[in-house]
Image (tube, rainbow, N blue to C red):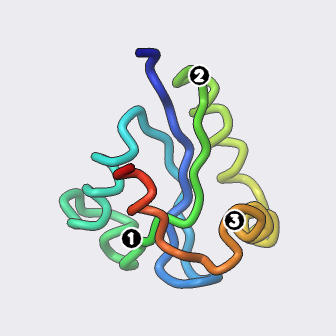
């Protein structure tokens, strides 16, 4: 099975605080954010709702996309989230399928 890499966006609430990250294990990484296992921005601001993710073929592609998205205006991030997830639902359960 080929490796998979992800860029994801977490939020604390609809149109609230956002966090953009990249990982090779989305289930593990979201679990770390939700459990506040790593002190930092997401733990401090209660940013635990997975509202967007996309898959990439390589970690280099995922990290490049992450860097790009981190520079986006908030409105652009809202637009990409709402295109995939208009109700700002927590998508974590979709990862368990």
Which residue is tagged 3?
A: 81
For the residues carrying marks 2 and 1, which lies nearer the camera in this image? 2
At 39% from the left and 44% from the top, the residue drawn is 26
Residue 9 pos. (x, y %): 55, 59
At 77% from the left and 64% from the top, the residue drawn is 83
Give the mark nearest the N terminus, 2 or 1.
1
Question: Could you say which is closer to the camera, residue 95 or residue 72?
Answer: 95
How many other residues sit within 10 Å of disc 1, few (<14), some (14-19) or many (≥20)? many
Residue 50 pos. (x, y %): 47, 64
At 73% from the left and 64% from the top, the residue drawn is 77
**25 with respect to 53 (left or right):** left
**24 with respect to 9 (left or right):** left
Give the mark nearest the N terminus, 2 or 3.
2
Residue 25 position (above or below residue 30): above
How many other residues sit within 10 Å of disc 3, few (<14), some (14-19) or many (≥20)? many
Which residue is tagged 1?
A: 48
Which residue is tagged 2?
A: 57
Label 2 secondary element: loop
Quarter assignment of residue 41: bottom left
Residue 77 position (above or below residue 66): below
Q: Kindly indicate whether the residue at mark 1 contacts the one at mark 2 (C-beta within 8 angstroms).
A: no
Q: Alpha carbon of mark 2 to alpha carbon of mark 3: how far?
A: 21 Å
In the picture, the quarter occupied by the N terminus is top left
């Amino acid at each position: 099975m080929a490796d998979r890499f992800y860029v994801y966006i977490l939020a604390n609430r609809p149109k609230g605080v956002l966090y953009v990250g990249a990982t090779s294990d989305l289930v593990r990484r979201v679990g770390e954010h939700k459990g506040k296992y790593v002190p930092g921005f997401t733990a401090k601001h209660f940013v635990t709702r997975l509202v967007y993710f996309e898959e990439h073929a390589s970690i280099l592609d995922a990290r490049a996309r992450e860097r790009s998205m981190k520079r986006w205006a908030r409105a652009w991030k809202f637009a990409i989230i709402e295109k995939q997830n208009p109700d700002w639902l927590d998508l974590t359960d979709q990862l368990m399928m």
